[in-house]
Amino acid sequence: MRINEYNCLDEFVDEYNKGVEMPWQNSDGKRRYMGIEFTYKGVYYRMCREPGEDDEMPKLSNGKIGRYDVMICHWAMPDYKDDNFILIGWYSDLNDVLENCIIDGRKFKDVIMDDFTKIEGKD
């Protein structure tokens, strides 16, 4: 039985590709988010488009600015704790996350679409 709320990758991309600091509804009626928390194989993860200025964000080895981070969390919302996570990596844009972030040997895009990935929260 599928527990993942996303039926296709485009649904996920539509919600996160143009992340904003707080959820809002666009003129097309779709909500946009900065971050998502999900459980995959019993591990709690967070992916977020960080809102910092370019000079506050990490510079990646390819010269691009890191905008999205992915981490393994040892907390669940609303019990956020800044220092209680393991950083998987920084990524320049959502496509970089989808294609280059590897979780448990699989690309992020495959993990976020897995039948048994449970979406825990969006912000």
Image (spheres, grey):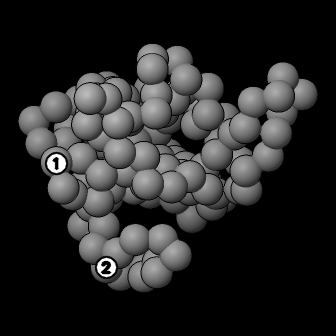
Q: Position of residue 100 (x, y in %)?
A: 28, 31
Quadrant of the drawing holding the C terminus: bottom right
Q: Position of residue 94 (x, y in %)?
A: 48, 33
Q: Residue at x 46, y 28 (%)?
A: 6
Task: Tell me the quarter of the picture where residue 30 sits.
Answer: top right
Q: Locate residue 17 relative to residue 43 in the image: left or right.
A: right
Task: Tell me the quarter of the picture where residue 95 sits.
Answer: top left
In the rendered image, the residue lying farthest to the left is 105
Q: Is residue 60 above or below residue 120?
A: above
Q: Is residue 119 above or below residue 110?
A: below
Q: Residue at x 20, y 38 (%)?
A: 102
Residue identified by numbered label 2: 84
SS assignment at label 1: loop
Residue identified by numbered label 1: 41
Q: Is residue 76 above or below residue 93?
A: below
In the rendered image, the residue lying farthest to the front is 1
Callout 1: 10 Å neighbours few (<14), some, many (20+)? few
Q: Position of residue 7 (x, y in %)?
A: 45, 20
Q: Residue at x 49, y 50 (%)?
A: 36
SS assignment at label 2: loop
Q: Residue at x 52, y 76 (%)?
A: 78
In the rendered image, the residue lying farthest to the right is 27
- The disc labelled 1 sits on which kind of residue? Lys
